[in-house]
Image (spheres, rainbow, N blue to C red):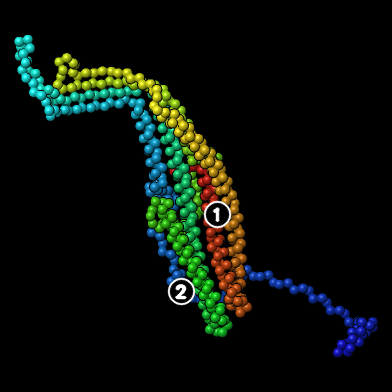
Amino acid sequence: MRKALFPLALLALLPGTALAQRPAPAPTPPTTAPPLPSAAQITLPPPPDVSDPMLAPVPPAKRILASWQEALTYLRARSTDLKIALDQVLQAEAQTRIALSQYLPSIQGTGTYTHQLITKPGGTTIVGGVPFQSPTLPVLDAWSGNLQLQQTLLNAQQFDQISIDELSEDAAKLSVDDQKRTLALSVANQIVSVVTAERSAEINRVGLKVALEQLEIAKRKQALGAANGLDVVRAQQNAANARATLVSGDESLREAREALGLALGIPEETSVAPGVDMAGLTQSAIGSCKIVNDVDARSDISAARTKLEVAKRNLRNVWYSFLPTVNAQSTVAETSPASATYPNPTWNVQGILSVPIWDGGARYGTLRNARAAEDIAAQQLEALRRQAIIQVEQAQRQLTVAQLADRVATEQRDLAAQNDVMTQTAYMAGQGTSLELVTASEAHRQAELNLALSDFNVVKARILAVLALATCPW
């Protein structure tokens, strides 16, 4: 055969022959694959009707939050953390009043009544020829009373303590402002978490419905002989995975509702009104606080700085305990029975000078304690300030990262949706496998969840970026 073809090939190469004069065929242009259609360009046949008890939505919460102002109302009325901070302010005010009382006049009255159980009866004696009746000794019934007024004239330690306690009041009030900022940030995050969980629960139900529809299609194809048992098992596994995701998502939703309720001081599930404008709610949360220029103006830093000043003043106050004190005292006293040789009542005025000489070393121990307390307050201020600087930087960076992650999640969701629709189309046309169908469906479902989470992460990051450098005097 090869020998027969060889002369023919040689003949084609010779000039003047018909084969040599035949023009060469025109080259075929390369074929390009048509662009893949998008998910919106693909039209799928209507899915089969499916029903399942798990497709029912989660029951609504017992309490619905309609606005940010309503959340602030709950915080003012029911927040235990805020009440504790306010009570600490009352304690600081009480300490100031106690310190002031040490420098104000004090009046004290005492009275006693004595009844003797063993007495010696008196008798009649003759004194200078005159009979004299001696009394019963001791006197059967006697009483006495006195009224004492005391005024501090000079006590540097007590006088200085008044201003120290006033500084402690300022620190407690600043702590209240920072507690409000912390509560506002916590409640805002809890609200976003509830809305995120609500959205995730909706996506989980859509995913379960799609999985059930794919399972129904696989069963029909098996009945027609176009699918085997493995295809049905894979579809069933996909539906089971969707159910598991739905169950865990519903529990996460309930826990998020309960966390929001606890943040508001309500021990029950609390949700957000459907269709609430998250942008407006976020703006209201941010508007309830005041932006400051730097971390040193934050309430917690100001409170720590005031506490450091209190520690310094306490150290100086200990030194005042080495100084003498001067007090004035006046006492009015009356007794029964009256003495014939002693005035009744009596009234005296005293000036008392107290000079501390030795107390066993208690004041020196107090000095060491005050020095250590000052150093602790200084270190706490520095540590808190460093932490606040990092918090602000991280909050700003977290917003940028969240926005970038949201764009990536949107692209991933779009690609997953396109892949899912195209895989379903190929599978219904008999070109794809059930494994590809299940994989695409699960990837699409997860991409939708990731997108919902990233959307609300942007909201959380925006709130944190603002409240990280703010005070909240609401």
Nearer to us in this view, 394 or 198: 394
Residue 178 - label: none
Left or right, 319 with respect to 468, comes to left
Q: Position of residue 368 (x, y in %)?
A: 46, 32
Q: CA distance from mark 1 to mark 2?
A: 35 Å
Nearer to us in this view, 437 or 101: 101
Q: Amino acid at mark 1?
A: Val
> On the image, numbered disc 1 is attached to which residue?
458
In the picture, residue 118 is in which quadrant? top left
Q: Quadrant of the C terminus?
A: top left
Query: Residue 62, can we see it?
Result: yes
Using the image, determine if residue 37 lies above or below residue 149.
Answer: below
> On the image, numbered disc 2 is attached to which residue?
51
Dot 2 alpha-carbon crowd within 10 angstroms: few under 14, some 14 to 19, many 20 or more: few
Tag 2's secondary structure? loop
Query: Residue 153, can we see it?
Result: no
Q: Amino acid at mark 2?
A: Ser
